[in-house]
């Protein structure tokens, strides 16, 4: 019926970004056409979960039909496949909002990510809440009929679109609540290998993608029906001929999935493939997980945890405002996605499900923040994940060691955040950290490894932070340590400088940043060296005083160094002051940073420093020495032109 002949039929245009998405879909962008089964079953399951949740406060919404289910019907003659659920349903306003626009710019986020990597299409389409549109991969028209639970039968709605940029809606009478989505398949998807009218293919896809869904997913049952001989047939006909027949549909619906939530089953009953398929479904990750843990926790708080560590970091890992978290169920009733309160922020990469036996069904995000039970679950989850990672790190099995190395390359920087965020697990986190050192470029040395290699008389774990490994290895700060044969841990991540503010010791051994404060090697410096240092300091007093005057506005102090061997000077940060790396990081984050000045240490044995005392260009040379020390420390010159001018003038004299 045309719009002109039916005043109830209303035409709407898709939101611009939805139209752009549909254009991509209908031009066969997607390499994995099967994903529409996963997405539409997942949406149907969500609709049933929402009804179950709403009904905890108003059980009349069940309308005397409390058996929630999903049904899939294939009509070979009409060339359609229909997904039906008796969940929460939609009215006209819901249909326009949910099927014509995307809340929270989900489509825009999807399109942005898609432009970065078109190969991840199958992963992304569900991740950004645009799974319904995957139906247009295989269908040239989609018809949706729905009625919202609790509303009268005449408040039903029919939504129809061919994906070309507009859709129509009209009111209908629908006796049964819930939603049915009918895909009118394109011709190429009704035959051959891509024939989605093949019931066996649909069953296989449901088993692959949606077997874990706790609701029954049903299809019409097929039975074998033999040919029946005509009553008028000659009795003398031979009965030796094989009986013919065919598979025929019955009116009986059979459940084609296990219809039990995976995490509620015993771990001994679940094989690895089931765990992997479940992970892919809840995470929209096409890769297998790196590792996982599945436990029932008993005690004051009872809950089931199924937690996964991905192989690769998601693109939004460092987008702190992006919601991360676990799926929360209470007594198998779905409550919310992305319950971030169930894990500390530094474990935001973990995916999985928590099913609590103690939380109330009407729990909200606000209540989660205040609940003692939730804090207990969060602490238990953190310990479980850290224990799982430690088992990989400490294993003698090479495969597990490789898995930990892969984990650390993807998530090592994130887990360092826990040093400042989770003081209760700080020791566990510290044991997982790995670094390069001044004797080994590979990021594989733990604090425990380092302690095992400390030389006799060494009382501290020495480390240095820098922007990258090359800068760290070439830092003048290492000169004395190389001379003494002392290994130094090289920290080259942006987060290291911040994180190490919270870790002052490991296994009762102090941690010392060699670029902060005075270097005290204790027993590693003999009395003769100390005496020579005191003598040099006394001899350099006039030069040091002149340097203090010349660098009054740039250096907090000037002193004779006992850490330099080959370089003329070095900049050192006072204990308690922000390092140049920390200052730069805070500035890049848009934060105000208090003015701090470094300490200049000079090498009394270097020819350039010795030349200072009799130089007629003392002030210019002092500024050049300071600038060179700043550059060696990875800093940036405030006035590069002035530096070059001074250097050129000194070279010409």
Image (tube, grey):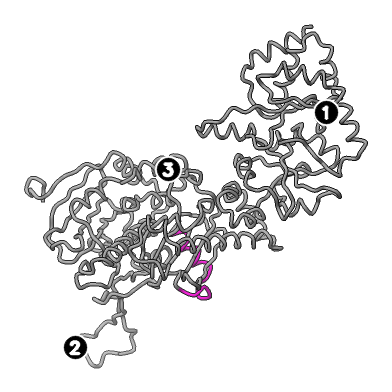
Callout 1 secondary element: loop
Outermost residue toward the top in this view: 653
Q: Is residue 115 left or right of residue 593?
A: left
Looking at the rendered image, the disc whose residue lies closer to the viewer, 1 or 3, is 1
Precedes in sequence: disc 2 or disc 1: 2
Q: Is residue 267 left or right of residue 167?
A: right
Q: Which mark is residue 218?
A: none
At a point 50% along the width and 51% down the height, the residue shown is 345
Can residue 277 be found in the magenta stretch?
A: yes
Precedes in sequence: disc 1 or disc 3: 3
Q: Which span is picked out in magenta?
A: 265-281
Residue that numbered label 2 is attached to: 231
- Residue 444, relative to residue 49: is it above or below? above
Q: Residues within 10 Å of mark 2 (few under 14, many from 20)?
A: few
Of the pair 626 and 305, the residue shown nearer to us: 626
Residue that numbered label 3 is attached to: 114
Callout 3 secondary element: helix
Outermost residue toward the bottom in this view: 236
């Amino acid at each position: 019926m045309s719009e002109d002949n039916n005043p109830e039929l209303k035409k709407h245009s898709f939101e611009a970004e939805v139209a752009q998405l549909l254009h991509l879909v209908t031009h066969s962008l997607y390499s994995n056409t099967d994903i529409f089964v996963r997405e539409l079953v997942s949406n149907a399951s969500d609709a049933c979960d929402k009804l179950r949740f709403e009904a905890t406060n108003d059980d009349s919404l069940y309308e005397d039909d409390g058996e929630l289910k999903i049904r899939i019907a294939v009509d070979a003659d009409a060339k359609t496949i229909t997904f039906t659920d008796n969940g929460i349903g939609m009215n006209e306003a819901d249909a326009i909002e949910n099927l014509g626009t995307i809340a929270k710019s989900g489509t825009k986020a999807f399109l942005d990510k898609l432009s970065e990597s078109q190969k991840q299409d199958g992963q992304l389409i569900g991740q950004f809440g645009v799974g319904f549109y995957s139906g247009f991969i295989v269908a040239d028209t989609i018809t949706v009929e729905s009625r919202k639970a609790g509303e009268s039968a005449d408040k039903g709605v029919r939504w129809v679109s061919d994906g070309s940029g507009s859709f129509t809606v009209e009111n209908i009478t629908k006796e049964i609540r819930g939603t049915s989505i009918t895909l009118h398949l394109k011709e190429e998807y009704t035959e051959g290998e891509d024939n989605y009218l093949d019931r066996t293919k649909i069953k296989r896809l449901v088993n692959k993608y949606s077997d874990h869904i706790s609701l029954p997913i049903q299809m019409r049952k097929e039975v074998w029906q033999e040919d029946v001989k005509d009553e008028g047939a000659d009795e003398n006909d031979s009965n030796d001929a094989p009986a013919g027949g065919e598979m025929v549909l019955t009116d009986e619906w059979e459940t084609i999935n296990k219809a039990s939530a995976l995490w509620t089953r015993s771990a001994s009953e679940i094989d690895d493939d089931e765990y992997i398929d479940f992970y892919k479904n809840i995470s929209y990750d096409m890769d297998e997980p790196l590792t996982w843990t599945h436990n029932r926790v008993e005690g004051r708080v009872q809950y089931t945890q199924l937690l996964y560590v991905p192989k690769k970091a998601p693109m939004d890992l460092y987008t702190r405002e992006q919601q991360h978290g676990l799926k929360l169920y209470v007594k198998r009733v779905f409550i919310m996605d992305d319950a971030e309160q169930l894990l500390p922020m530094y474990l935001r990469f973990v995916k999985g499900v928590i099913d609590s036996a103690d939380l109330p069904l009407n729990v909200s995000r606000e209540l989660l923040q205040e609940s003692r039970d939730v804090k207990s679950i969060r602490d238990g989850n953190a310990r479980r994940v850290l224990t799982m990672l430690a088992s990989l790190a400490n294993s003698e099995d090479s495969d597990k060691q490789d898995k930990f190395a892969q984990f650390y390359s993807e998530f090592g920087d994130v887990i360092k955040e826990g040093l400042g965020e989770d003081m209760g697990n700080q020791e566990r986190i510290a044991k997982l950290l790995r670094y390069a050192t001044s004797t080994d470029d590979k990021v594989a040395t733990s604090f425990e490894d380092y302690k095992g290699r400390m030389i006799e008389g060494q009382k501290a774990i020495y480390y240095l932070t820098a922007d990258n490994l090359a800068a760290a290895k070439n830092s003048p700060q290492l000169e004395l340590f190389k001379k003494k044969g002392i290994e130094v841990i090289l920290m080259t991540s942006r987060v290291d400088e911040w994180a190490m503010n919270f870790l002052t010791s490991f296994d009762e051994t102090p941690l010392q940043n060699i670029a902060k404060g005075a270097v005290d090697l204790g027993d590693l410096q003999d009395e003769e060296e100390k005496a020579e240092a005191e003598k040099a300091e006394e001899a350099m007093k006039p030069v040091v005083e002149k340097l203090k005057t010349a660098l009054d506005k740039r250096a907090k102090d000037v002193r004779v160094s006992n850490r330099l061997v080959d370089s003329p000077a070095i900049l050192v940060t006072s204990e308690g002051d922000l390092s140049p790396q920390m200052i730069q990081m805070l500035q890049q984050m848009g934060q105000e940073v208090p003015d701090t000045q470094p300490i200049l240490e000079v090498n009394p044995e270097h020819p350039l420093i010795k030349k200072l005392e009799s130089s007629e260009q003392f002030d210019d040379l002092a500024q050049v020495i300071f600038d060179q020390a700043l550059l060696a420390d990875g800093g940036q010159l405030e006035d590069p032109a002035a530096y070059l001018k001074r250097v050129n003038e000194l070279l010409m004299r």
